[in-house]
Image: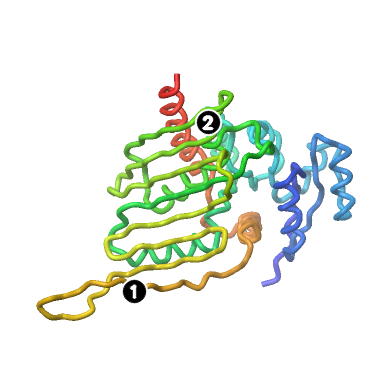
Amino acid sequence: MNRPPVNIALLGVGNMGRNHLRNLDMLKRVNLSFVYDINRSFCEEVAALYDLKCSDDLERDLQGIDGVIIATPTSTHYDYIERVAPYVKNIFVEKPLTEDVESARKICKLAKEKELNIQVGFIERYNPAVEALKKVIQNTDHVVNIDFTRTNKVSSRITDVDVVIDLMIHDIDLAMNINGNVEEISAHGYIKNGMIEYARAIITHENGSFSNIVASRITEKRMRHISATCEDMYIDCNLLSKEVIVNRQTLEQYLDDVSISSREETITVGLQEALLSELMDFQKLCWGDPVDVANEIDGTVALEVAGRIQKIIMEQNR
């Protein structure tokens, strides 16, 4: 079916914004109408590289736009969603939805009042290794525990949020996406200069499964790793190398003295870039197609869980 092009506006041309630019440039039937950034000179510089318009009047230029992508600092998300909402129905906002639960709940109310379609950029849902992991998990009777590890080297790039909101929230979302609602949380962490830089949380889900989540910004190694312990298999998943290895229990012989061994399988994983897949879903959202994306409710629930983890850690370190 020949679809009309989708007119997209991009707010924020920093590191993540430029990633969006690169991927939007690859999408067919997408018209990037303009880019916007409070740093006018930098915005013009980036716009020139892609032969784009750099907006100097956001409200004026939002007329006729089908979808807006917000890739600005977390502390500005609420204000930009509120500015955009009167003009554009379809809004993509990078994770986290906002900087706190209170403002996220206001966004949920605004979305309901104005019938907005909000997609939150939990990009790891689109990681091909995660997609493969979820398909394997569907074939087990019970997930006992899932370990999530996400670390970065020390970086000065993110200064407005702690490690729970910066890194851990990805795995909080994945944990709930795979194992469902949260029943109980315990947590520990390390605080430096008033910010949580290392956090470990154990989540007990309503279905009886556990999620053990570790996030660190003080580890001199970048890791993105998930391992799932199930009743009948163990799944090892490297999100960076896109490797998924499954170890299944097998019976070598059906005699009186039965020996148990493990059979290892390597799952073939696709290589399409996660952000491109994510933006393809946003394009469908703008067309009015039914898509299964992280919405404002998912974003708010993730922030609520993150807030509980932060509170536990901060109280322990008083």
Return the residue at label 2: 196
Q: Residue 224: image x %, image y %?
A: 53, 53
- Badge number at residue 80: none
Of callouts 2 and 1, the N-terminal one? 2
Rendered-image quadrant of the N terminus: bottom right
Q: Say if 279 sits above or below 269 in the image.
A: above
Residue 263, numbered circle: 1
**In this picture, is 64 found above or below 154?**
below
Residue at 23 percent of width and 79 percent of height: 252
Which quadrant: the C terminus?
A: top left
Three-letter amino acid code at the position of disc 1: Arg
Q: Secondary structure at mark 1?
A: strand
Image location of residue 313, percent across then percent down = 44, 28
Determine whether, in the image, residue 48 is placed left or right of residue 129.
right
Is residue 205 left or right of 42 when viewed as pictured? left
Across and down, in percent, residue 164 comes to 52, 37
The answer to whether one can see residue 232 in this image is yes
Separation of disc 2 and disc 1 at Cα? 40 Å
Label 1 neighbour load within 10 Å: few <14, some 14-19, many 20+: few
- Which residue does the image show at 49% across and 54% down from the upper left? 225
For the point 27% across and 61% down, which residue is it? 231
Q: Report the coloring of the rendering.
A: rainbow
Amino acid under label 2? Ile
Name the spot of residue 192 as percent of width and height, x first. 56, 27
> 94 or 3, which lies in front?
94
Q: Which residue ends up furthest to the front in the rendered image?
A: 220
Callout 2 secondary element: strand
Please rate how many residues cluster around mark 2, counting C-alpha atoms within 10 Å: few if below 14, some from 14 to 19, many from 20.
many
